Image: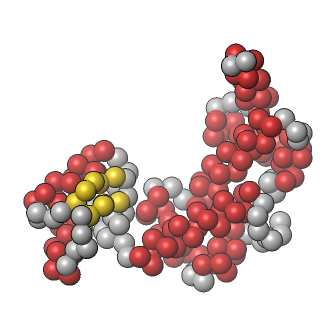
Amino acid sequence: MIKSMVCDRCIKVVRDQLNDLNLPFIKVELGKIHFKRDLQSAELKALGKELIQEGFEILNEKELKIVEGVKFVVLSEVRGYSNRTANDSYSTVLSDELKVNYSKISKLFTQVEGKSIERFIILQKIERAKELMTYGELAMSEIAYEMNYSSPQHLSKQFKQVTGLSPTEFKEMASREKLDNT
């Protein structure tokens, strides 16, 4: 896997390098290259050398598993599938679950995903809040409590920062869409 491919220009640069090296690939997408076959050691080394010159690097399977592990743990936490208490920080939970120092996890995740773990957590929490608001079964205070926010105001502030809408505006918009679709 290649790190730091975060735009179409990056994909083009990587695709050009693959073509220049005559490496058999199926497709290049953000953060990934799909090869037609496993690369030989010399091919992988040549690719790594070329990509480093362009500001990229090849990640190994262990590093990829760490990034995927972060996503899994965060999603489990946000959805309430874990046994974490409100006192446990995400950094502690991630380090414990993945058996890796948090600073390494954080640096690797940011390199691969182009956003910090903290930003990823916020985005996932807001998506979950939107889902819960759409169901209409819980009050904002209950949603905030369920998602370990310090207060409904804190959730509302983050919600507005991420979506550009207040929770009330979001609920009204969701209600109007339901009416329009019936």
Residue 56 drawn at (x, y percent): 29, 64
Q: Is residue 22 visible?
A: yes
Q: Is residue 53 visible?
A: no
Residue 15 drawn at (x, y percent): 21, 54
Residue at 45% over, 78% down: 62
Residue at 34% over, 47% down: 7
Residue 11 drawn at (x, y percent): 28, 51
Name the image quarter holding residue 94.
Answer: bottom right
Residue at 67% over, 45% down: 127
Please tell me whether residue 133 is drawn above or below residue 128 in the rendered image: above
Please tell me whether residue 182 is drawn above or below residue 134 in the rendered image: above
Residue at 16% over, 64% down: 23
How many numbered markers are drawn? 0
Q: Is residue 47 left or right of residue 158?
A: left
Quarter of the figure that contains the N terminus: bottom left
Q: How is the image coloured?
A: secondary structure
Q: Is residue 24 left or right of residue 82?
A: left
Residue 137 drawn at (x, y percent): 88, 39
Q: Nearer the viewer, residue 41 or 89?
A: 41
Quarter of the figure that contains the C terminus: top right
